[in-house]
Amino acid sequence: MDNVTAVDRSAALGIFDSGVGGLTVLKEVLKILPFENCVYFGDVGRTPYGGRSKDIITQFTRQDVAFLMEQKVKFIVCACNTASSVALEDIRDDYPVAMVGVIEPGARAAAQRTKKGRIGIIGTHATVNSNAYARYIHEIDPKLKVFSLACPLFVPLAEEGYIDKEATYLIARDYLQTMRDVDIDTLVLGCTHYPLLKHVIGDVMGDEVLLIDSGEETARAARDVLSETNILNPGASQTPCPEGERRFFVSDVPEKFGGVASRFLGQEVSRITRVDISRY
Ligand code: DGL
């Protein structure tokens, strides 16, 4: 559905994820759109989505979007690679706000930057099985070779803060050997958690492999859409530009949430409200 009615430019951006991982995308959004008000929803109570079926991921994604719609957001960023690859295309036309997912921006960046035409994608099982990254890449250039690999253990490692541990290197070396064998020059970090392990993945893959952070690319894509459709927050044109308000909503508040969330966002996460997502 098109944005047919006038959009309130001061309204917040809605950003959602299956849990805490989408805060890595929010971090990138805040770097280039600091003046925007943001509402983040993390489905912490039902995370992870990555091993679930298409039906369930689609149902959860609809509920996440319905919650954000109730917050009267002007634009939605689906920060979750799993939801973006499995559900977003099926549901986006059912809502009266524009949405951007993480797959298309990451795929576009990889297709543009590869020199050898050999691209690797790592993500959850659902993201890899959906083949969504490869589809977008082949729409841009059918000749590009795409190799996909699920690396599910990276999610709990990132959440547990296993960033610099030998165990993480061991798992990364084991997972990524197949990517090394197929001689890629570009690797898409196709999961919200992987930017936290960027240096481990980079060390294992070597300097000659370019890592694409889908979150960074998505933040740029969001800025482009807001600017092209003229719905940037009016604060964008003020100097100095005022900082937007951030609100955080989650479907459960596990004991460790605050600490993990602050590490993913790179700053303190406060004002966390619990939501009963089953109502949506
Ligand atoms: N946020 C998910 C993604 O980017 C990872 C965690 C999960 O499996 O829910 O795919």
Image: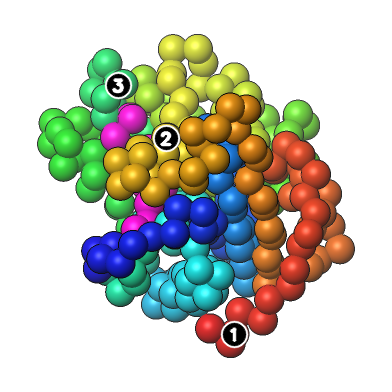
Please identify, in this view, whether the residue under mark 1 or under mark 2 is nearer the observer: 2
Report the front residue among 139 and 16: 16
Task: Characterize the magenta stretch by its predominant secondary structure.
Answer: helix
109 magenta-colored: yes
Q: Residue furthest front?
A: 238
Please identify, in this view, whether the residue under mark 1 or under mark 3 is nearer the observer: 1
Q: Mark 2: which amino acid? A: Arg
Q: Residue furthest left?
A: 142
Asked which quadrant contains residue 232, the reply is: top left
Residue 30: percent from left, percent from top = 59, 39
Q: Is residue 127 visible?
A: no
The residue segment tinted magenta is 98-110
Name the residue located 30 percent from the left edge and 52 percent from the top edge: 131
Secondary structure at numbered mark 1? helix
Q: Mark 1: which amino acid? A: Ser
Q: Which residue is mark 3?
A: 114
Report the front residue among 237 and 80: 237
Q: How is the image coloured?
A: rainbow
User: Given contact means CB atoms under 8 Å apart, are the residues at marks 1 and 3 in contact?
Assistant: no
Q: Is residue 46 visible?
A: yes
Label 2, label 3: how many angstroms apart (C-alpha)? 19 Å
Q: Mark 3: which amino acid? A: Thr
Q: In the drawing, does residue 219 fall left or right of residue 37?
A: left
Q: Which residue is mark 2?
A: 220
Please identify, in this view, whether the residue under mark 2 or under mark 3 is nearer the observer: 2
Q: Residues within 10 Å of mark 1 (few under 14, many from 20)?
A: few
Secondary structure at numbered mark 3? loop
82 magenta-colored: no
Secondary structure at numbered mark 2? helix
Q: Which residue is mark 1?
A: 278
Label 1, label 2: how many angstroms apart (C-alpha)? 32 Å
Q: In the drawing, does residue 40 fall left or right of residue 101?
A: right
